[in-house]
Image: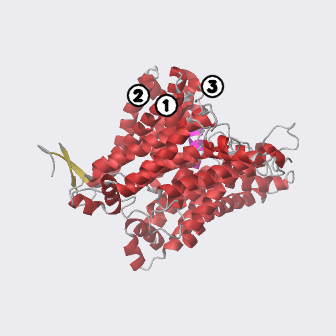
Amino acid sequence: MNFGAIDPVLLIASLMVAATPLIFAAIGELVVEKAGVLNLGVEGMMIVGAISGFIIAVETGSPMLGLLFAAIGGALLSLLFAILTQLALATQVPSGLALTLMGLGISSLMGQDYVGVKPPTMARLDIPVLSDLPVVGPILYSHDPALYLGLVLVACVWWFLNRSRAGLTLRAVGENAEAAFALGYKVVRIRVLAILFGGACAGVGGAYISLVRVPQWTEGMTAGIGWIALALVVFASWKPGRAMIGAYLFGGVTVLQLNLQAAGLAIPVEYLSMSPYIITILVLVFLSADRSSAPGSLGRIFHASR
Amino acid sequence: MIALEKRPEPSRWLGFATPLFAVLATMIAGGLLFAALGKDPVAAIATIFWEPLFGEFAFYYRPQLLVKGAPLVLIAIGLALGFRAGIWNIGAEGQYIIGAICGAGVALAFYPFESALIFPAMVIAGAVGGWAWAMIPALLKVRFGTNEILVSLMLVYVAEQLLASMALGLLKNPEGFGFPGSRNLQQYPSAFNADLIANTGFHWGVAAALVAVIFAYVLLSRHMLGFHIRLTGAAPRAARFAGVEPSRIIILCLGLSGALAGLAGMFEVAGPSGQITIDFNVGYGFTAIIVAFLGRLNPIGILFAGLLMALTYIGGDIAQSQLGLPAAAIQVFQGMLLFFLLAFDLLINFRLRWQKGATA
């Protein structure tokens, strides 16, 4: 075994990369849940985003265009969920599961001809002087633009939820849909928009995996990251900043276990690969006692006729 | 403008009819999908639904219907009990894997010793394995209020890794020339889950699935416990006032569904599959969720839904080899079914009415 092979600076830099898909997916789902909707289809929307972004990036040669279409792909899939739960008043849990099953199928259908293809690489930030600084350079100033976009998104969502009027409305809809409706807010419209936003974010998160993190296309490549993102929202007590910290924590665990695999630790690879999932469970155990911060109408069906 | 009007009572006949509507709508939408993929939609649908039952090689495919249907029904019955009570075990795939590992582990521990007691021991090990795996989310939910959806799902990924480690390590065939995978249980008479009637596909798992259907039917419609399960799902507060202990229902429902999924895995590894391999699990645990809903969470309905879903698996395989229909298209097809099902459920509780102008 060789711990010397693990470079802490590279470790931190790569944990930021590993955390970015989680940040996108979790922050999107956070907004959805703040609007009172529980969309369990994150995994499905991510993988559809992963393949839509991958196809567009390969065909056009532009990773940024790929990310854009990943957002559109994820949002389109989430539209199905919106129709089911908001218009057809279907129960949210099975609808989300349906979305995930469907997304996995659609993505492998779309990706048949793209297995083994190499996507165009996303240019990395290269600021003279700053990017060349030791330690700080590789950690802060030499990532791809999408990673910074994720951080900006966290800040924007925080501002939106806590400082803007529209965010207040969204939260009101999530806390008590009936009261918000009585005040004249368009509950269904707001929820549909939130669901679409969540879908777009999950899509970008997925494409970040297929375009930057891995970068290639394999079936089912999101491997539960969408579900971990759902757990992150609970972990974060529905607060954007805490979601980001959580994502870094999980990114750290993932990268560390990969590094330990590479360093040849005496634990079999399979047991190391389990660790992110087991840690997710442990974190859920420690944080689930406090559900007071969950939005009041989370997961409930709303129909104006009642 | 279409307005929704809540029915005073859920419509009974639509409760039976909506699954059929959903199947029809899926056939139409699926046909469009197949046409978009450049396949003849009518031929594709006919291949999927007709060929396995009445085609030239139906004698081969009909037994497959039982082989594929049994694990789906067995798992879905357990899931439906939980879903009825509002307990969402979506990690059946993991419990299925653990059941198979435990069942095969018992068999391989005794190899090559022959005894009539080995198979019953495997059955118990499979059920206990699945039960124990499901007890993790159950106990965490009861003790810490942890979300059972997320925990049971995370455990699927853990189980998959465990499966890989077993196939490559502990349970690897020592005479397998270094290839991953366990000994083939089909060549170990004491452990082999053979057809009870030759060439019918009717193995012990099919018998167990039928027993589970009857058991669940009696439990839900004739037994106090079944009533408590339904009450917990329909009106949790009322259930608590009626003296139903929620944690008891959680432990019971998750435990039962885990044990049934474990049994399904054990019967599969001892029979049709034969060995523990890295890709032993093929998603029955997830498809069973669709089966449970397609059967309207009703045991008898699940029996038919399981057979129908098995049909799409077999028909999908045929369509894949004969028409070159991609395997993923069948997956989308099955996903669509759940979608239409959930969408049409609206009609049971609401009436659609045409209204002029915008609604209030």
Depicted A12 relative to depicted B32: above or below: below
Along the horizontal axis of the image, is A201 left or right of B159?
A: left
- Camera-side residue: B292 or B215? B292
For the residues carrying marks 3 and 2, which lies nearer the camera in this image? 3
Dot 3: element: loop
Q: In this rendering, do the residues under marks 3 and 2 share a single chain?
A: no
For the residues carrying marks 1 and 2, which lies nearer the camera in this image? 2
Mark 2 is on which residue type? Gly
Q: Is residue B315 visible?
A: no
Along the horizontal axis of the image, is A153 left or right of B344?
A: right
Q: In this rendering, do the residues under marks 3 and 1 share a single chain?
A: no
**Label 1: which residue?**
B48
Which residue corresponds to the image point at 41% horizontal and 42% vertical from the top-left?
Answer: A78
Q: Where residue B189 sits: x, y (%)?
A: 79, 48
Mark 3 Cα-neighbour bin, 10 Å: few <14, some 14–19, many ≥20 = some
Question: Where residue B31 is drawn, which disc sits there?
Answer: 2
The chain holding disc 1 is B
Q: Main secondary structure of the magenta part?
A: helix
Depicted A124 relative to depicted A205: above or below: above
**Label 3: which residue?**
A118
Q: What's the magenta region?
A: B64-72
Mark 1 is on which residue type? Ile
The chain holding disc 3 is A
